[in-house]
Image (cartoon, rainbow, N blue to C red):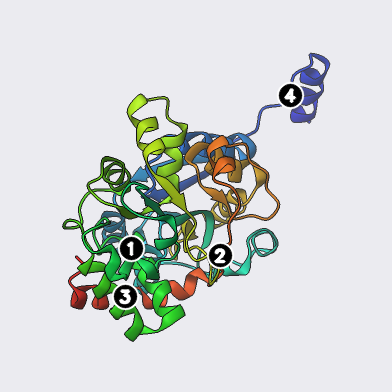
Amino acid sequence: MKKVVLATLLSTLGLSAPVLAQGELNIYSSRHYQTDEALYAGFTEQTGIKINRIEAKEDELLERIRNEGANSPADILITVDASRLAKAEEMGIFEPVKSAVLEERIPAHLRDDNWIAFSTRARVIVYNPDMVQGEQVQTYESLADPALKGKVCTRSGSHPYNLSLGAAMIKHHGAEKTEEWARGLVNNFARTPKGGDTDQIRSVAAGECGVAIVNSYYFARLMNSDRAQDQEAVNAVRFVWPNQASWGTHINISGAGMLKHAPNKEAAVKFLEYLSSDDAQRYFADGNNEWPTAKNVTVNNPALEKLGPFKADELPVGELADTVAEAQRIYDRAGYR
């Protein structure tokens, strides 16, 4: 009765009733983007559920969950890349979530029983037009062409971004051809793999390399930057959506799942469903230059709009997780470290 009276009083004053606290949610996250703060605040505002968050590197969080066992306070694990989700699944730490909302909102190839993908990023090619012709680098496969010897730069082959690309290559071409590709790629290196994806873009812009593989959101971040050196780097290179005439550009994900020993399972499901909402999906696109996974979400990001539409690989991301370990073995044999 008191709640009704309070709501009526606030209404007469032109105010809305505050959301009453509905409990807590404990999140372990390896995402480290400041723009995600608005995402968490939006969930609490909508539900009244307080979020407690621990951020750390993926391996640290997985080890923590393992050590905590049944006593773990964690409800949700958030991480990036299919290879990291694969490691989590191997540990058996997730509990399957049944949700009509998630099944309706998230395409089948971007979820499985244990986790959902709530944003995507693409593995793209950038090249220096003074060193490489665009028609030479329209596919991932072309980067192993001997004509590019001494011109290719990448980050480490052990990095999850490149392992997931290798896993996709295995699915599309088989292990034998993927190993041939990896050996050709290594033979074409301009230097030993090092640095992050922004470093690869800068190296191509500076002429240290002719071509590199990078994640799309790093390039979009430079496009959106107001720093002169970032604009110089963007203007010095060209951007390619690989494999548009075949299986499409490889995409990877940020994903989340509910943990087996979650003490707040109802809140955890609500959070996963919230991640698929239009508002949450726009945070990823507008805040971190990623693409929404939910259907029919409109975004307002000048850099993403400028990059334009592309054909994405629709290989189920869960299948990539199955071949990540094989990709690592292939890379090791090829000397891609």
First of labels 2, 4 by sequence position: 4
The numbered dot on residue 181 is 3
Q: Amino acid at mark 2?
A: Leu
Query: How many angstroms separate mark 3 from mark 4 (CA)?
Result: 60 Å
Q: Which residue is mark 1?
A: 162
Please provide percent x and percent y for residue 125. 40, 55
**Which one is in front in this view, the residue at disc 1 or the one at disc 3?**
3
Give the Cα distance between marks 2 and 4.
37 Å
- For this rendering, which residue is in front, 79 or 316? 316
Q: Label 4's element?
A: loop
Residue 309 screen position, x and y as percent: 61, 52
| Residue type at numbered disc 4 | Ser
Whichever of callouts 1 and 4 sits on the residue coming sooner in the sequence is 4
| Nearer the camera: disc 1 or disc 4 | 1
Q: Are marks 3 and 2 in contact (CB under 8 Å)?
A: no
Residue drawn at the location 41% of the way across and 36% of the way down? 235
Q: Are marks 1 and 3 in contact (CB under 8 Å)?
A: no
Above-or-below relation of 315 to 234: below
Q: Is residue 173 above or below residue 317?
A: below
- The percent position of residue 163, horizontal first and vertical second, equals 33, 67
Q: Amino acid at mark 1?
A: Asn
At numbered mark 1, what does the secondary structure look like: helix, strand or loop?
A: helix
Mark 3 and mark 4 lie on one chain; the one further toward the N terminus is 4
Disc 3 packing (10 Å; few <14; some 14–19; many ≥20): many
